[in-house]
Amino acid sequence: MPRGNPSDGGLTTRERVLQEAASQFIDHGFTRTPLSWISARLGVTKAALYYHFESKDELLIALVSPLLDRVDQLLEDMEKRPNGEHDKRLLLERYADILAQDRRAAAILGRDLNVSSHPAIAPRIENHVRRLMDLLTGSVPDPEELVRVSSAMTIIQRGLVGRASEQKTVGALSRDEHRRILVRLAFGILEQRFADGTAPADPPSPVPRLVSRPGRVS
């Protein structure tokens, strides 16, 4: 059984590699982070890294697969349920919980196009997006509904894995409260309806004001 290093909170070498790799991928991007950086930060040789992971790609997949697996399971569970309004809110809540529980992997997936377009990862993300849209829109969605769903998902994803500087704006909130607010906002967008079932007309364009500029009078 692998034993952890007491100086690192009892983490095994593999766990330390994953932790450091996640930090470097988030700060510098997947493609810009060589394995030599990770080994140097950990004080181990590259050979020690290769003992646990055969390549940087394998390391990346080990970091994000648990989150992707949990989304797979969520979608399978929800696809077995009736597609009612209560289930839409439950789907948003559980999806937000998954992202919040593994913000490290969510940040790597959400911020780095080289990760989300990786050939071993992109098909899974595309599958998730298609199934989420099916569950949240219904059988024949109209364009407005598609925009609402896309906006709702963006609120949750961006709100939970925004960059560190953006997180300062919600520093006074607990993580649970922050997540609940995001889900409430996202669900509100999903359920937005207009009295006649259509979107309101665009407001009239404002009349441009002519601003006189000071100048010499001839």
Image (spheres, helix red, strand yellow):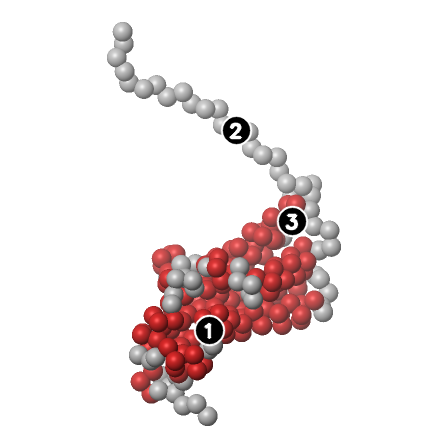
- Check contact, mark 2 vs mark 1: CB within 8 A: no
Residue that numbered label 2 is attached to: 205
Residue that numbered label 1 is attached to: 55
Q: Which amino acid is tagged 3? A: Glu
Which of 50 and 182 lies nearest the eye of the viewer? 50
Q: Residues within 10 Å of mark 3 (few under 14, many from 20)?
A: some
Residue that numbered label 3 is attached to: 145
CA–CA distance between discs 2 and 1? 56 Å
In the rendering, at what x and y percent does residue 194 appear?
A: 65, 44
Q: Which amino acid is tagged 1? A: Ser
CA–CA distance between discs 2 and 3? 25 Å
At 48% from the left and 70% from the top, the residue drawn is 57
Q: Which residue appears farthest toward the front when viewing the image?
A: 47
Q: Quadrant of the C terminus?
A: top left
Residue 16 appears in the rendering: no
In the rendering, at what x and y percent does residue 40 appear?
A: 31, 74
For label 2, the SS is loop
Name the N-terminal-most of marks 1 and 3: 1
- Check contact, mark 1 vs mark 3: CB within 8 A: no
Q: Residues within 10 Å of mark 1 (few under 14, many from 20)?
A: few
For label 3, the SS is helix
The reply, left or right, for residue 120 in relation to residue 134 is left
CA–CA distance between discs 1 and 3? 42 Å
At 54% from the left and 72% from the top, the residue drawn is 65
| Disc ID at residue 63 | none
Name the N-terminal-most of marks 2 and 1: 1
At 41% from the left and 66% from the top, the residue drawn is 25
